Image: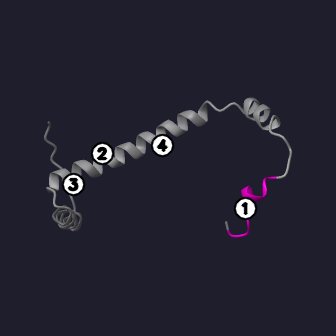
Amino acid sequence: MSTLSVRLPESIHRNARIYAEREGTSLNQLVATALAEKLAALAAEDYLQARAGRADDAAFDAALAAVPDVPAAPDDEMGVGD
């Protein structure tokens, strides 16, 4: 475990203390969890961008061309507002 000193605006610090208390956890645990969630979101974005970068338009067009051109099943149609 390592130590990190972070300077926060008073309003963020105050709200963090309030929510940590409300969640029944320490301020350190709240900050660690919030940072972990943010890092997971950033990693997911990186993953999706990497996948998009490997996209193959020709392969997509070939797959789409293989789909039969038939009407949707009655229970599979989208109505207005769906």
Structural distance between the alpha carbons of marks 4 and 1: 29 Å
Q: Secondary structure at mark 3?
A: helix
- Say which residue appears at 26% left-offset and 49% top-offset: 33
Task: Report the magenta stretch's main SS.
Answer: loop
Write down the region rendered in magenta: 72-81
**Marker disc for residue 36:** 2
Structural distance between the alpha carbons of marks 3 and 1: 42 Å
Structural distance between the alpha carbons of marks 4 and 3: 23 Å
Residue 35 place in picture, x, y as percent: 29, 48
- Say which residue appears at 86% left-offset and 47% top-offset: 70
- Callout in the foreground (3, 1): 1
- Say which residue appears at 23% left-offset and 64% top-offset: 12
Structural distance between the alpha carbons of marks 4 and 2: 14 Å
Q: Secondary structure at mark 2?
A: helix
Of mark 4 and mark 2, the one earlier in the sequence is 2
Of mark 4 and mark 1, the one earlier in the sequence is 4
Image-quadrant location for residue 30: bottom left
Image-quadrant location for residue 76: bottom right
Residue 4 place in picture, x, y as percent: 16, 43
Of mark 2 and mark 3, the one earlier in the sequence is 3
Does 73 lie within the magenta span? Answer: yes
The answer to whether residue 27 is left or right of residue 42 is left
Q: Give the residue at mark 4.
A: 45
Residue 25 place in picture, x, y as percent: 16, 57
Q: Give the residue at mark 1.
A: 78
Q: Give the residue at mark 3.
A: 30
Give the residue type at disc 3: Leu
Give the residue type at disc 4: Glu
